[in-house]
Image (cartoon, helix red, strand yellow):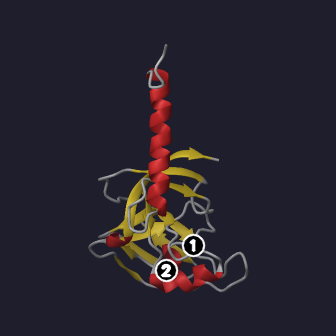
Amino acid sequence: MTSPLDTGNRWAVLGVTLFVLGCAGMIADRAPAAVLVNESPSLPKGVYIRAFGKPPEPGSIVAVSQPASVRAYLRNLGMPADVRLIKRVAATAGDQVCAVDDHMVLPGRIVRVRREDRQGVILAAWRGCRRLGPGELFLLGDTPSSFDSRYFGPVHDDQVEGVFKKVLTW
């Protein structure tokens, strides 16, 4: 007779356990999530697992609480205030970030800033040209339609609820 925890099943049990724990983390009020499911157009739709102990650095994917300055806008789109934003770190402390006309100039790239969202609502754009200070991060999604730091500005690393790795996309 084989045990349900034989080698082949052990991985399945571990995967289900991690998924359940991650879901519990998403539901818990203040507990950091171990697993996030992204359905937004900012990054590929899919499952992201938290990389515990890893600091945010350029290129890493982070989940942040919604900046207070944009909660009303996001609420009008139907997004609850407790839904995290999942973005990629585009610039960190010491990096120069500049808004120039309808573009954002960042280390190694230039991205377009949209004037309005997909529903025709005028977007407030972050304006400025400066080096990011200690603990500041400039976040971008992977798509041109992402709602990110181009519109709400840099965030402080204390808003980061974790660094995540993409594990499954659809």
Q: Quick check: 101 above or below 17? A: below
Residue depicted at 45% across the width and 21% down the height? 6
Q: Earlier in the sequence, mark 1 or mark 2?
A: 1
Tally of marks? 2
Q: Amino acid at mark 1?
A: Phe
Q: Residue furthest front?
A: 1
Q: Is disc 1 surrounded by few (<14), some (14 to 19) or many (20+) residues within 10 Å?
A: many
Q: Amino acid at mark 2?
A: Phe
Q: Residue furthest right?
A: 119
Question: Is residue 72 visible to us here?
Answer: yes
Residue depicted at 49% across the width and 51% down the height? 48
Q: Quick check: 45 above or below 132? A: above
- Dot 2 falls on a residue whose secondary structure is helix
Residue depicted at 39% across the width and 57% down the height? 163
Asked where in the image residue 113 lies, by quadrant, the reply is bottom right
Question: Is residue 165 visible to us here?
Answer: no
Residue depicted at 33% across the width and 69% down the height? 157
Q: Position of residue 76 (x, y in %)?
A: 64, 83
- Dot 1 falls on a residue whose secondary structure is loop
Q: Position of residue 168 (x, y in %)?
A: 56, 44
Q: Position of residue 9 (x, y in %)?
A: 49, 26
Disc 1 target residue = 147
Q: Position of residue 107 (x, y in %)?
A: 41, 65
Asked where in the image residue 40 lies, by quadrant, the reply is bottom right
The front one of 157 and 134 is 157
Q: Which mark is residue 152?
A: 2
